[in-house]
Amino acid sequence: MPRSIPGCVMLDGRAAIRRRLGLRLWLSGGWLALVLLAALLAPWISPQDPLAQDLMSGRLPPFWVPQTEPGFWLGTDSLGRDVLSRIIWGARVALIVAFVAGTLTATIGSALGLIAGYFRGWADRLISRLVDIWMAFPPVLFAILLIAVLGPGLMSIIIAIVVIDWTRFARVIRAEAMNQGAMDYVASAQVAGMPRGRIMLAEILPNVLPTIVALLSLEMGISVIVEAILSFVNLSISTDQPTWGGMIAEGRISVHQAWWVLVFPLIALFLTVLSFSQFGEGLKDRFDPVLR
Amino acid sequence: MSGYLRIRNLSVALRDSGARLLRSVSLEVAAGEVRGLVGESGAGKSMIGKAVLGILPRSVEVVEGEIWLGDVDLLRLPPAERRKRVGANAALIPQDPLTALNPSRRIGGQVTDRLVDILGWKRAKAEARALELLAEVHIPDPARVMRSYPHELSGGMRQRILIASAFAAEPRLIIADEPTTALDVTVQKQILRLIAAMQARHGTTLLFVTHDLGVVSKVCQSLSVLYAGLMVEDTTVADFFRAPAHPYSAALLAATPKYTDPWASLMPVSEAVIDAVRAEVDAAETEWRDAR
């Protein structure tokens, strides 16, 4: 055998590609940061008390209309409550639901998906059948039923979202874990005697993480929508706490006299949900170790 | 007891249909010997390696036989015991270097894992040894490569790393599962030489699974020919290339392109030979069924 083999110094060209952060990530991240700040600083930055009613200044138009009063930037609703302040306070509920429900759903769904996809066998059969059964339920009815049983409240909404949406993660992560489990690096780890639980957590989990993050971001957007839908049908939290869904429901009644009561929370909701999904996609692109 | 790896009457079958994929295969590899395992795709050559290492796909199972590694029958050991035994004494050089390294972990950790897990070394000591190993497989700038992710390296580089980590814990047996198939022809030769050099230096017993008789003639001392899960020939490389005993082996040899005469037209394996070897397979199958 020759003493030395000419070394292969070639590096894969893909390593040199430095992707830019991208407009998508900037815009969606920017909006989410804004909403987060609004939610955190609500008591200090909201121009009015979100609950203060003043029937004398009901249905004031937004600031660019000449006959409005100063101090009510986005107008007031039929009870004279400031729309901007209510949107800012509503961001709190929206984000709490998004983060808590999103994270819980992701954790539970992904854990079950990983177990099903990697261990297969009876665990997979059990979890997959459970997913099938779950998915046969109409989700909105299921949510309403759950809230009716649990009673309205922030906690009930979060539980309802987790109970309904874990299947979303379980299905996708199961498929991903199955893919990864068939790779040679898993076989190598198995040959080296690594326990199966550790293979799942140390070898497979990091490779499905980009997918989990993307789904999580999407799920946060969905949680915001679900909360809004439940508020819309009056099944959300108490009516004295401003929520975007509640505002939309109230705005719908007076849309012909005061469109701004409906439109501004709708815009906030729309932008937030869109940003969550775009942010997730952007992160996935950015942090995926392999360009897929 | 002569061989380090001794397989006796090994039969592997599909779980649901019971169809046999390996038909009472017996095989012996002496300590320090390089044995080729050849056959067309689907002949079951990889299956033998997987059965030894305990990484058979879920859909198949060992139905009878013995796999002796040193003085222990692996199939008699409880699973945990077996994993330990295999991990300490055997390693795998996988077929596809692109999927055999975990894409989300740095190279360093993946090479040192074995030293830490199997030999119980400290991280720092393992890292020093890993650097030596990478240098031994002629990787330029090992320190930088240790910090790299797999996607930053070329296929040839990755295969070198896999070879280094297979030899890392000084296993007595290495199973190389078509280690050059996924590589460029130019890189194949380097990798073959490297495996042969490493094997000679470490005195490792090597089972070399391949469909390329040219490769066998370069690195192996003996070989086994497999057709449809049936061992049709078991001989030394010298005897095989001088005068193959089985008609199928002879036909296989005639179908291999020769570098000395590249323009000679290739002989496809004739129908008559295929029919004859199929009849042999059928005979073995009926005999096996009758015995049960």
Image: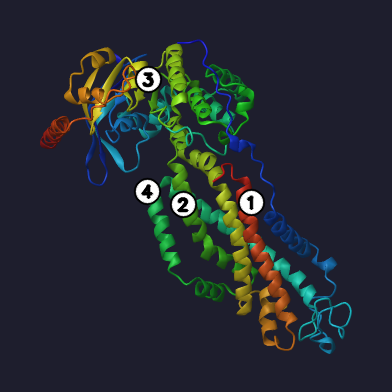
Q: Amino acid at mark 4?
A: Gly
Image quadrant occupied by the C terminus of chain B: top left
Image quadrant occupied by the N terminus of chain B: top left
Tell us which disc is closer to us: 1 or 2: 1
| Residue at mark 4 to residue at mark 1: CA–CA distance | 33 Å
Q: Single out the residue that lies furthest toward the front.
A: B263
Q: Residues within 10 Å of mark 4 (few under 14, many from 20)?
A: few
- Same chain shared by disc 2 and disc 3: no
Q: Secondary structure at mark 4?
A: helix
Q: Residues within 10 Å of mark 1 (few under 14, many from 20)?
A: some
Tell us which disc is closer to us: 3 or 1: 1
**Residue B134: x %, y % from top left:** 56, 21
| Residue at mark 1 to residue at mark 2: CA–CA distance | 21 Å
Question: Is A139 located above or below residue B83 in the figure?
Answer: below
Residue assigned mark 1: A283
| Residue at mark 2 to residue at mark 3: CA–CA distance | 36 Å
Rendered image coloring scheme: rainbow
When asked about the image quadrant of residue A135, the answer is bottom left
| Residue at mark 3 to residue at mark 1: CA–CA distance | 44 Å
Dot 2 or dot 4, earlier in sequence? 4
A255 vs B288, left or right, is right
Tell us which disc is closer to us: 2 or 3: 3
**Residue B291: x %, y % from top left:** 12, 34
Residue assigned mark 2: A174
Residue assigned mark 4: A121
Q: Secondary structure at mark 2?
A: helix
Q: Residues within 10 Å of mark 3 (few under 14, many from 20)?
A: many
